[in-house]
Amino acid sequence: MTKDHGLTLIELLVVIAIVSILATAVMPLSRMTMVRVKETELRSSLRTLRNAIDEFKKDCDTKKLNTLESYCKTDQNNYPETLEQLTEPLKMAGAGDKTRKYLRRIPRDPFTPLEATDKPNNWGLRSYSDAPDSTQWGGGNVFDVYSKSEAVNAKKRTMDYYSALGFPEMAGKYFHHTYDDLSNFNYRILYDPQSLLTKLTNLFFSKDSPFPWIVINR
């Protein structure tokens, strides 16, 4: 004689826990995929902008741009005044009307919303005299660009973390860098707070550091 068996309370709780874990794991996947796509777009856009800035300076240093047009300013280390200048047809040196555009358009920062639809330049700017991690443009020239969202959020995470520990002054001791800054180095990530494994672990254990751990190999 057989008996009908249902789920015990413990079995039901186990099933609910497993379903909850799977649901929690699946939901961030699409979000993480979109972030990875944006990160790829960000690296490509930064590379495009930095190459255009370097090409402009190179043409100024080698006198290839028309010196009568005041494009190149030695007091600004021959860097462009604005990113918009790189989209304009600039006259080359020599006879004729030959011009050059260093950018077809200014690519957008995929992580930072536009301030206005008629202002496609939503990048953070640094001049030649600015500090490497400066978030305030000193003006005069464009030496480098960065994602406003990335830099601001990184500084906020640092301040929140050390404020929670009771040492907010420690936040001012840190320099903030992007993964793009490490593109020329051989590095590996030991710990990624945004990884799926870390997010799952944080469901059951106390949260670890909000900062990634990176080793740069020689």
Image (spheres, grey):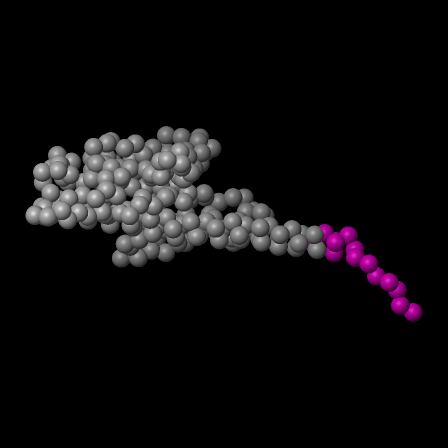
95 is higher (above) or lower (below) than 124:
below
State the residue lying farthest toward the left: 95
Q: Position of residue 71 (x, y in %)?
A: 15, 38
Q: Quadrant of the N terminus?
A: bottom right
Residue 116 visible? The answer is yes
Q: Is residue 19 magenta?
A: no
Residue 192 in the figure: left or right of residue 23? left
Name the residue at 34% across, 52% down: 44
Quadrant position of residue 60: top left
Residue 132 in the figure: left or right of residue 198? left
Q: Magenta stretch: give its range.
A: 1-14
Closer to us: 181 or 162: 181
Name the residue at 44% across, 31% down: 163
Q: Position of residue 169 (x, y in %)?
A: 37, 30
Name the residue at 20% across, 32% down: 140
Quadrant position of residue 170: top left
Q: Position of residue 103 (x, y in %)?
A: 26, 47
Residue 216 visible? The answer is no
Q: Is residue 11 magenta?
A: yes
Q: Quadrant of the C terminus?
A: bottom left
Circle count:
0
